[in-house]
């Protein structure tokens, strides 16, 4: 019980610091004083993941804690790394591309999958219909051959249509976006659309 209350107190202090400490020096001092480098909340989220999800300046703050020695690759209890949280939960959209590049440059594996549903960050971007992030991840080497835990998503050479249908199920009108994604696949991954074949059945959660 004491450990839980201590964990909750640190969590609240992190949120308070992210909200109130706008100067770099005071932010560093507050984090150093309040948050152990090995800290994870009750769900297993590290300081970096919490910054990505809750900070009004996630890129700046993530870069700062990285310089202070905090991990940017620690997964939570469901296997979600800061990279997964960047794609799925970062609310500061202008920072997401920079965060992805920062995380990949500092040890986060691009194709690591969550342990709950077996999703890579690229698969999450596709399910969300976020073509820009999908393109960025592909350009940085994300695999299109991954399947989730139940083999319901397959980004193989014969399943570009699965990406399209996942976008459609996410409520997006994506013909133009699909053209952009195919161009990205051709340019960044040497993907030959002339060799498309077969089809992929999807069973995605709403």
Image (cartoon, rainbow, N blue to C red):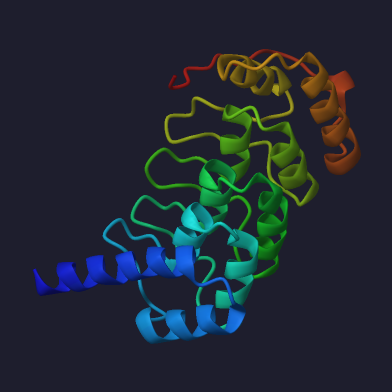
Whole-percent x, y for residue 131 in the image: 72, 32
| 137 versus 203 height, above or below | below
Q: Classify residue 4 as left or right of residue 100.
A: left
Residue 138 seen in the figure: yes
Give left or right: position of 139 versus 205: right
Q: Residue at x 47, y 68 (%)?
A: 20
Q: Residue at x 41, y 53 (%)?
A: 79
Which sits in the foreground, 139 or 12? 12
**Residue 141 in the image, given as x and y percentages of width and height:** 75, 50
Pinpoint residue 53: horizontal percent, then vertical percent: 48, 53
Looking at this view, is 32 or 199 the one in front? Answer: 32
Give the number of marks.
Answer: 0
| Quarter containing the N terminus | bottom left
Q: Quadrant of residue 9?
A: bottom left
Question: Where in the figure is residue 84, as x and y percent of width and height?
Answer: 53, 49
Judge left or right: residue 146 versus residue 190: left
The structure residue drawn at horizontal position 91% and vertical position 38%, both measured from the top left corner, is 187
Q: Is residue 52 above or below residue 172?
A: below
Give left or right: position of 13 versus 52.
Answer: left
Residue at the left extreme of this rendering: 1
Occupied quadrant, residue 35: bottom left
Could you say which is closer to the camera, residue 197 or residue 104? 104
> Which residue is at a point 60% across and 50% down the rendered structure image?
111
């Amino acid at each position: 019980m004491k450990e839980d209350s201590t964990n909750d107190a640190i969590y609240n202090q992190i949120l308070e610091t992210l909200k109130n400490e706008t100067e770099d020096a005071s932010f560093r001092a507050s984090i150093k004083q309040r948050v152990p480098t090995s800290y994870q909340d009750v769900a297993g989220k590290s300081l970096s993941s919490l910054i990505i999800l809750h900070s009004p300046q996630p890129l700046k703050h993530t870069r700062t804690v990285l310089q202070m020695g905090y991990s940017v690759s620690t997964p939570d209890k469901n296997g979600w790394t800061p990279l997964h949280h960047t794609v799925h939960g970062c609310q500061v959209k202008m920072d997401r591309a920079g965060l992805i590049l920062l995380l990949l440059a500092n040890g986060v594996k691009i194709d690591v999958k969550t342990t709950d549903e077996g999703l890579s960050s690229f698969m999450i971007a596709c399910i969300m219909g976020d073509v820009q992030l999908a393109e960025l991840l592909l350009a940085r080497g994300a695999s299109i051959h991954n399947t989730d835990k139940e083999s319901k998503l397959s980004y193989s050479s014969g399943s570009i249509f699965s990406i399209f249908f996942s976008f459609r199920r996410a409520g997006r009108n994506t013909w133009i976006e699909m053209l952009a994604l195919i161009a990205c696949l051709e340019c960044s991954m040497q993907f030959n659309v002339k060799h498309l074949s077969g089809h992929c059945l999807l069973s995605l959660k709403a």
